[in-house]
Image (cartoon, rainbow, N blue to C red):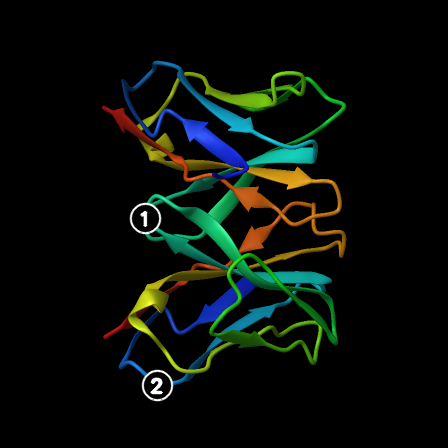
Amino acid sequence: NAGVTQTPKFQVLKTGQSMTLQCAQDMNHEYMSWYRQDPGMGLRLIHYSVGAGITDQGEVPNGYNVSRSTTEDFPLRLLSAAPSQTSVYFCASSYSGTKNEKLFFGSGTQLSVL
Amino acid sequence: SQQGEEDPQALSIQEGENATMNCSYKTSINNLQWYRQNSGRGLVHLILIRSNEREKHSGRLRVTLDTSKKSSSLLITASRAADTASYFCATAPWGQNFVFGPGTRLSVLP
């Protein structure tokens, strides 16, 4: 099993550009989520999904969209990138849809918005 | 302010010493978890302790939970240089998503 795979690892965008961060897991996990990590802030939840076709907002959803058409994939879309979205983004999944179980993390995407 | 906060923010010890870091939180929780993050990598799950448990062990790790004080501690015994990383506590309020603290940066010097 590859676990949770995120692409790309690094990305530089100009203000106003859009892009999609990819996340895929091969563990048949119901729960998937996106976090951003900023210095001194810990991880903050952007969006999450408890199963295919179901998504919901986390703590910091503005400027981001998600969809969950399959169990395996959970892409994160930046609609119009802003410098405030410069961060490291992590996708995580867990086997249960109850939100509270052990999370498996991807290796992250470092995004810079100029 | 954050649901979970680790203390200290940074800790530097010699190899072979024990490392203790603490986590405080504000609301009732279902469980509390500790994660490790090596520089430039994703987080790795270390241990989960449920609200009805007081102590758990996993190898050189010992976690305690005091729900009356809303606090947890992570003890790493006989530390090694490979333990150098950031450690995060994640609290899970009932029926809600995890909340992560800002982390403790541990440096283990050879």
**Residue sitting nearer the eye, A27 or A21:** A21
Question: Badge 1, how many Cα within 10 Å: few under 14, some, many 20+?
Answer: few
Quadrant of the image for the C terminus of chain A?
bottom left
Left or right: residue A2 compared with residue A37? right
The residue drawn where x is 39% and y is 46% is: A41
| Residue B12 badge | none
Query: What amino acid is found at the position of numbered circle 1 in the picture?
Result: Pro
Residue A78 appears left or right of A58: left
Q: Is residue B69 above or below residue A111?
A: above
The number of numbered badges drawn on the structure is 2
* Any part of residue A1 in sight: no
Q: Residues within 10 Å of mark 2 (few under 14, many from 20)?
A: few
Q: Position of residue B33 (x, y in %)?
A: 59, 35
- Residue in the image at 47% along x and 74% along y: A63
Q: Quadrant of the N terminus of chain A?
A: bottom right
Disc marking residue A17:
2
Q: Which residue is mark 1?
A: A39
The quarter of the picture where residue A55 lies is: bottom right
Observer-nearest of B13 and A82: A82
Circle 2: element type: loop
Q: Secondary structure at mark 1?
A: loop
